[in-house]
């Protein structure tokens, strides 16, 4: 659903639209949450479709003993500095000291299938995008509370849900700011660029928006007079929401020089939704926008759905059969499905390499921005197109100021439903605990682990610094 931002502002300000419909950033309608911030840290979650096949995460230089453990899904770890990376990961070969290949985390709590919707970020089963199934704020929103910024959490997406038309503008997203609330996201690079950086790229519209917000705030304040009870509370909430947006605009304006310094360049091919842009061009543009938004201080947490089953991959030069991600997921239906999986991941890793390289080039404190950044490249649905969701191989790139002790290693944890296994819920609990949220356990419990009476609560203690 495409949202006209100015119309939405008017409707929201007049009390005729739900606050849950705020585009891309529900948190703009409430003051940014404050929390412990012992050292700034940034997070970029990159979601991919079709799962990650475990065999494509083999290290070519595994010893026969290590390969046997890998194939039998036994727990072990190795030093990446002493090993060769798979071909699709070799673009990051110069950054192995920052890399973690994390194996063995299960996603059964969120489920496999074609999509996980909000589930893979919230560690619960979200079903087929059913609003009532959103149980709580997803982990990216929780992390954004710990490191407040003018925009809070930002979501971007190249997803085109199977059977739907190409998406542009501000559309329905996958993260969630709270229970039963769906986030909204930027569906094309130009929209993200225009909305995030307009305080310096479109000062006339920014001024117009400010005038509109001032007018609506004054109008709603007048409506408060003479009201009481539930009606007063409703209008009071609207006034506070509008004031929060005005406060955010003030914070953004104060970053003007920094925004100009890190303003990305967007190719005109991305105008009007970028229908003529190739997928690599779209991915590269989104990467530049992400770097600009992080470097200018507009946000500290980004979630980026880099593809889904409906994303058009016909513009990939290696896609000679002009097949689709969905067909590749079914493997046997086309020749070279495994090769195309690696091609897709190779293009993804080009963007991760760009993120790492650019953030390492930007000074911050006694080091660089990347020192205070974690990038998590993860499958949406586990180990394949329809799962299984018993494992979900991930790649992490983590700066030296990380609160996690995992870098430079290939780590395979105990397999699902065995002693010592760790679920997606454990993984997210670890992230939150490491960065200031002492929650005892985030996410749902795994039913198989429960039936087998295996411990599954809390953080992964060995990962904590």
Image (cartoon, grey):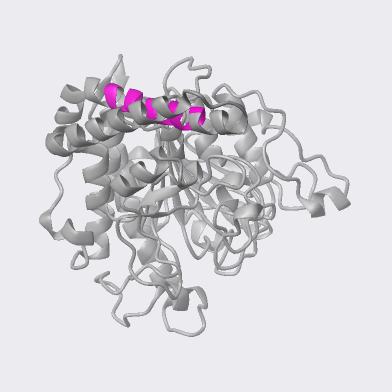
In the image, residue 27 above or below residue 48:
above
Q: Nearer the viewer, residue 250 or 86?
A: 250
Q: Residue at x 13, y 53 (%)?
A: 267
- Is 378 situated left or right of 313 in this image? right
Q: Quadrant of residue 455?
A: top right
Image coordinates of residue 169 in percent, x first then y, are 30, 55
Image coordinates of residue 384 in percent, x first then y, are 56, 66
Image coordinates of residue 230 in percent, x first then y, are 61, 32
Residue 242 counted in the magenta span: yes
In the image, residue 258 above or below residue 354:
above
The quarter in which the N terminus is drawn is: bottom left
Magenta stretch, main secondary structure, is: helix
The quarter in which the C terminus is drawn is: top right
In the image, residue 401 above or below residue 48:
above
Q: Nearer the viewer, residue 109 or 94?
A: 109
**Residue 150 visible to an observer of this rendering:** no
**Residue 227 visible to an observer of this rendering:** yes
Image coordinates of residue 401 in percent, x first then y, are 43, 22
Q: Residue at x 17, y 35 (%)?
A: 263
Please give the count of numbered marks on the rendered protein.
0
- Is 173 situated left or right of 124 in this image? left
- Is 319 situated left or right of 17 in this image? left
Q: Residue at x 49, y 34 (%)?
A: 407
Q: Nearer the viewer, residue 440 or 16?
A: 16
Residue 364 counted in the magenta span: no
In the image, residue 33 above or below residue 95:
above
Range shown magenta = 236-250
């Amino acid at each position: 659903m495409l949202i006209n931002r100015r119309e939405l502002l008017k409707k929201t300000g007049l009390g005729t639209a739900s606050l849950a419909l705020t585009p891309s950033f529900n948190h703009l309608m409430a003051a940014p949450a404050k929390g412990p911030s012992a050292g700034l840290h940034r997070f970029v979650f990159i979601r991919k479709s079709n799962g990650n096949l475990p065999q494509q995460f083999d290290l070519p230089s595994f010893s026969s003993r290590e390969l046997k453990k890998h194939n039998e899904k036994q727990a072990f770890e190795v030093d990446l500095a002493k090993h060769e990376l798979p071909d699709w990961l070799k673009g990051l070969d110069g950054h192995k000291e920052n890399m973690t290949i994390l194996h063995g985390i299960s996603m059964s709590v969120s489920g496999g299938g074609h999509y996980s919707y909000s589930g893979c970020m919230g560690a619960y089963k979200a079903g087929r995008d059913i609003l009532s199934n959103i149980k709580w704020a997803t982990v990216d929103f929780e992390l954004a509370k710990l490191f407040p910024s003018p925009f809070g959490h930002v979501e971007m997406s190249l997803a085109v849900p199977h059977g739907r038309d190409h998406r542009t503008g501000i559309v329905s997203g996958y993260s969630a700011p709270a229970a039963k609330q769906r986030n909204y996201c930027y569906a094309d690079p130009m929209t993200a660029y225009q909305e995030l950086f307009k305080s310096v790229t479109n000062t006339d519209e920014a001024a117009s928006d400010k005038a509109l917000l001032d007018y609506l705030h004054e109008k709603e304040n007048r409506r408060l007079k003479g009201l009481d009870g539930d009606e007063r509370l409703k209008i009071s909430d609207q006034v506070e929401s509008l004031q929060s947006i005005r406060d955010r605009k003030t914070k953004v304006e104060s970053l003007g020089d920094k925004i100009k310094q890190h303003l990305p360049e967007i190719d005109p091919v991305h105008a009007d939704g970028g229908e003529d842009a190739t997928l690599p061009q779209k991915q590269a543009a989104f990467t530049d926008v992400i770097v600009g938004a992080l470097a200018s201080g507009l946000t500290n947490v980004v979630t980026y759905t880099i593809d889904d089953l409906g994303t058009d991959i016909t513009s990939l030069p290696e896609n000679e059969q002009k097949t689709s991600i969905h067909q590749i997921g079914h493997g046997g239906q086309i020749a070279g499905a495994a090769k195309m999986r690696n091609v897709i991941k190779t293009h993804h890793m080009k963007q991760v390499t760009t993120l790492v390289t650019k953030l390492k080039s930007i000074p911050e404190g006694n080091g660089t921005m990347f020192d205070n950044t974690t990038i998590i490249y993860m499958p949406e649905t586990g180990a394949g197109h329809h799962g299984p969701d018993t494992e979900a191989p991930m790649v992490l790139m983590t700066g030296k100021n990380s609160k996690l002790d995992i870098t430079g290693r290939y780590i395979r944890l105990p397999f699902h439903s065995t002693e010592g296994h760790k679920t997606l819920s454990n993984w997210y609990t670890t992230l939150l605990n490491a960065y200031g949220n002492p929650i005892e356990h985030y996410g749902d419990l795994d039913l198989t682990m429960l039936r087998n009476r295996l411990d599954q609560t809390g953080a992964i203690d060995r990962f904590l610094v």
